[in-house]
Amino acid sequence: MHVAFSIVPFRTTTPNVILGPQGLFLVLFRLYCLGHQMNLLIFGAPGCGKGSVSEALERDFGLLHISAGELMREEVEKGTPVGRRVAALMNEGSLIPDKVIVDIMVKRLREPDAREKGVVLDGFPRTLSQAQALTENGFEIDAMVFINVDVKLLEERCLQRRMDPVTGRIYNLKSDPPPESIMGRLLIRSDDTLEKHQRRMRIYREQKSALMKHYEKLIIEVDGNPPLPVVYAALHAKIDQLRKAKRKSKL
């Protein structure tokens, strides 16, 4: 049986504004997206590949990659009071205080593109209090992706990291090499030294158990020791299953 229907003008909550067929489609599409987007948290030790995995998920699933580190560096570049404080802590290899990073991240997560697309959170939350603040601000996580990598390999990766000052992209000379054309401009970040890596690892170990306990029912663990393409292929299949299950639950 075929059912005939027509699209009638749709009034918005703004007085005297009427949407035609195209505008109505955009409104309905956005409402559909708000019910079907995924919010993922990428978690693991320093050097596990969070940034590379996040970028791949953004590309393949249409999510928005929000990097806590990138937002912090933007504050530093702007020279804001928060940025100057962040710069000093980063040079020490220390983590940013919870309140500072929560305020910056929550502000970004409330922007329209994050709400409509869904997000891949890279480097946040790192502590239990950050995770609790995220929930208190009405933000729910669909899955925590835990990238598990051997300690010695993490150290090796840290010392091989390079940053492109033009794009901010982080590369690894061995596991995620940059194009030959930009090799000459790459920099070693001030916090990518053995001493600072070991300090970050101590902090990570102190915070890991509480955060994983908080998200224990949402954890998707992947072996992060193989080359990145192998790691991502395994993760892609799991995230695709999660997306399909979420869509099915909304029907």
Image (cartoon, rainbow, N blue to C red):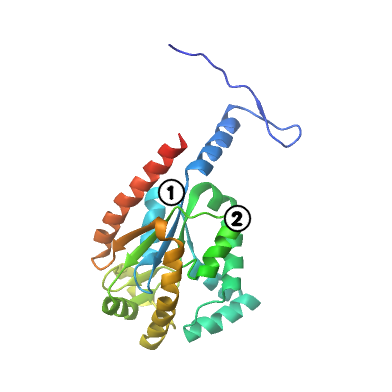
Residue found 52% across the figure and 73% down from its top: 73
Where is residue 216 shown, x and y percent of the image?
41, 60
CA distance separating discs 1 and 2: 18 Å
Q: Is residue 135 above or below residue 78?
A: above
Q: Which residue is mark 2?
A: 110
Query: Is residue 89 left or right of 249 when viewed as pictured?
Result: right
Give the label, 1 or 2, closer to the camera: 2
Place residue 199 in its image quadrant.
bottom left
Query: Is residue 245 left or right of 8 when viewed as pictured?
Result: left
Looking at the picture, which amino acid does disc 1 mark? Gly
Query: Is residue 101 left or right of 237 when viewed as pictured?
Result: right
Looking at the picture, which amino acid does disc 2 mark? Arg
- Give residue 153's mark: none
Give neighbour class at mark 2: few <14, some 14-19, many 20+ (Cα, 10 Å): few
Sooner in the amino-acid sequence: mark 1 or mark 2: 1
Residue found 41% across the figure and 62% down from its top: 42
* Residue, far right: 15
Where is residue 176 shown, x and y percent of the image?
30, 68
- Give residue 62's mark: 1
Q: Is residue 167 visible?
A: no
